Image (spheres, rainbow, N blue to C red):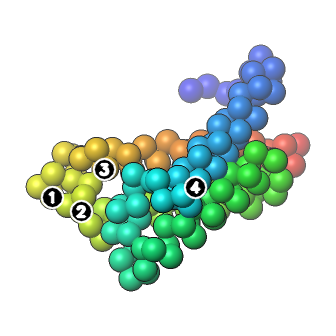
């Protein structure tokens, strides 16, 4: 991966907002599923944070995700929002510690369940948030 050239600038004009908006849509969508009690990951959320009542935690987390997604869609407070997105997504890995049987087959971290694959893909979303954060930082210092 070489140095960035000015040839990538037109693509940045579309790709970076598309990345931010797509993450925002995913957050709103997944949040609404939690708020309405339709989320297929409610068990994972409860298992990751077993010391909080799931009946409270799942909808509260859903509203938090809806709000975070809305802020991403609006493009407001990008630095703070992207840091919160990355930290929130990193928190999903708690399930690997709290309930490994839900995410791994036979305690083998190389043999992920469907739930494990679902959580592991958050590495990509964290990196996407970091790319966007790097662009926000770079624009402000240029």
Secondary structure at numbered mark 2: helix
Return the mark for residue 13.
Answer: none
Check disc 2: other Cα within 10 Å, few if <14, some if 14-19, many if 20+. many
Look at 24% across and 62% down and name the residue there: 100
Circles 1, 2 touching at the beta carbon (< 8 Å): yes
Return the mark for residue 100.
Answer: 2
Look at 36% across and 61% down and name the residue there: 44
Q: Which residue is mark 4?
A: 31
Look at 81% across and 47% down and name the residue there: 75
Q: Is residue 130 visible?
A: no
Circles 4, 1 touching at the beta carbon (< 8 Å): no
Q: Which residue is mark 3?
A: 116
Look at 26% across and 54% down and name the residue there: 103
CA–CA distance in space, label 3 to label 4: 19 Å
Check disc 4: other Cα within 10 Å, few if <14, some if 14-19, many if 20+. many
CA–CA distance in space, label 2 to label 4: 24 Å
Viewer-nearest of labels 2 and 4? 4
Answer with mark 2 or mark 3, whichever residue precedes in sequence: 2
Secondary structure at numbered mark 1: loop
């Amino acid at each position: 991966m070489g140095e960035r050239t000015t040839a990538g600038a037109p693509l940045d004009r579309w790709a970076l907002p598309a990345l931010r908006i797509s993450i925002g849509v995913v957050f709103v969508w997944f949040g609404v599923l939690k708020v309405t009690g339709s989320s297929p990951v409610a068990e994972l959320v409860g298992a990751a944070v077993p010391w909080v009542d799931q009946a409270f935690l799942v909808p509260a987390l859903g509203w938090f995700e809806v709000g975070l997604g809305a802020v991403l869609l609006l493009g407001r407070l990008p630095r703070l929002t992207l840091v919160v997105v990355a930290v929130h997504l990193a928190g999903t890995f708690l399930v690997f510690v709290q309930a490994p049987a839900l995410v791994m087959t036979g305690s083998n971290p190389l043999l992920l369940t469907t739930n494990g694959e679902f959580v592991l893909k958050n590495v990509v979303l964290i990196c996407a948030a970091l790319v966007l954060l790097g662009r926000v930082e770079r624009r402000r210092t240029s």
